Image (cartoon, rainbow, N blue to C red):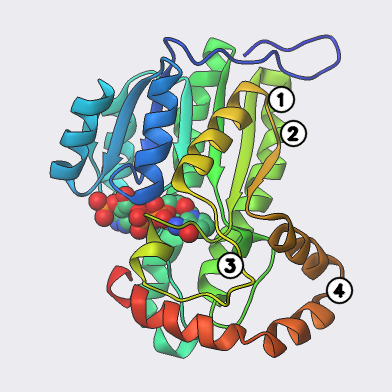
Amino acid sequence: MARLESGTLRPMNLGGQTALVTGASGGLGHAIARALAGRGAHVILTARRVDVLEALAQETGGRAVACDLTDRAAVAKLVEDAGPVDVLVANAALPASGGILSFSVEEVDRALDVNLRAPMVLARLIGEGMIERGGGHIVFVSSLSGKAATVGSSVYSATKFGLRGFAMGLREDLRPRGVGVSTVFPGFIRDAGMFHDAGTKLPPYVGTKKPEDVGAAVVRAIEHDKAEVDVAPIPLRLGAAITGLAPELAAMVQRRMGASDVASQMERGQREKR
Ligand SMILES: NC(=O)c1ccc[n+]([C@@H]2O[C@H](COP(=O)([O-])OP(=O)(O)OC[C@H]3O[C@@H](n4cnc5c(N)ncnc54)[C@H](OP(=O)(O)O)[C@@H]3O)[C@@H](O)[C@H]2O)c1
């Protein structure tokens, strides 16, 4: 992606670009891979479940590469196996929901490895090639939990807030080198993915979005070099913004609206993914 006089990056055309998508076997990873392939990108799909990846690779004309992101040597090998990458979408994550005392130290480490360390290391290793070639784009899939923490989200929010900080700084570091960096913040996503799989029932006033909305947001972030894109109904986005400005007020409102009931359901429904 070339730099314009103004310091902003030229819009990227995804046609013919090679895009590596982590967490491609999951609900949102499928939608992201389909959206990128739909714009003409060659997708490289990675996760641990290769059988799921192979089916998606056939559908999208892409390539599947198995990798366990908790394995440091495997992360380096993934970069080698992928070859030159124009677009990195760091999407893989564990839900890591629940109070801190319900986690073993090993589970905390796993959440940090998959949700934060792997995206940072992949950006470091793959970003180097982008800089050498004078262009590329890196997208981090965070969460509204990366802007507002709630009861039972401490471990998950730590990783997702961390991703936001990393991406904000990295964006400024890589801008002069012609490489774009974006962060996408989904709220509750229905039909597929970690929230859907948990079977959590939300209060009727809390809205959701579809996996395809996340795929479209990733494409928009890349094509228009957006710093941040939220994928949630306006009330949730406003709630996250207010939490940043007035955390005590926001926490009181969340308590009154029954956030702990939703959190307990999520912890039960997502425990097997730790
Ligand atoms: N769904 C939502 O409502 C929602 C809301 C906000 C943010 N998000 C974010 O959106 C992204 C995608 O989530 P999702 O809903 O699609 O979740 P998901 O369906 O649970 O998928 C998670 C993905 O991460 C991969 N993964 C987990 N552990 C891994 C490991 N050790 N090594 C390699 N890959 C690993 C899984 O692949 P394997 O199991 O095959 O390895 C899977 O592809 C995540 O960053 C999540 O935090 C989702």
Identify the amino acid type marked 3. Ala
Identify the amino acid type marked 2. Glu
Residue 19 placement (x, y as % from top left):
41, 25
State the residue in front, 131 or 111.
Answer: 111
Q: Which residue is mark 3?
A: 158
Going from N to C along the chain, the mark reached first, 1 or 4, is 1
Q: Quadrant of ligand 1?
A: bottom left
Residue labelled 3 has its Cβ within 8 Å of some atom of ligand 1: no
Going from N to C along the chain, the mark reached first, 1 or 3, is 3
Give me the C-alpha separation between circle 1 and circle 2: 5 Å
Q: Which residue is mark 4?
A: 246
Query: Does the CB distance between marks 4 and 2 fall below 8 Å?
Result: no
User: Looking at the image, which residue is at 45% across and 32% down?
Assistant: 125
Image quarter of the N terminus: top right
Give me the C-alpha separation between circle 2 and circle 3: 22 Å
Give above or below for 221 relative to 105: above
Judge the density around disc 4: few (<14), some (14-19), many (≥20) Cα neighbours within 10 Å.
few
Q: Which mark is residue 175?
A: 1
Give me the C-alpha separation between circle 3 and circle 4: 19 Å
Identify the amino acid type marked 1. Arg
Q: Which mark is residue 85?
A: none
Report whether residue 240 is seen: yes
Going from N to C along the chain, the mark reached first, 3 or 4, is 3
Query: Does the CB distance between marks 2 and 3 fall below 8 Å?
Result: no
Q: Is residue 189 left or right of residue 104?
A: right
Give me the C-alpha separation between circle 1 and circle 4: 31 Å
Q: Which residue is mark 2?
A: 172
User: Looking at the image, which residue is at 63% across and 37% down?
Assistant: 182
Image quarter of the C terminus: bottom left
Which quarter of the figure has residue 143?
Answer: bottom right
Which quarter of the figure has residue 240?
Answer: bottom right
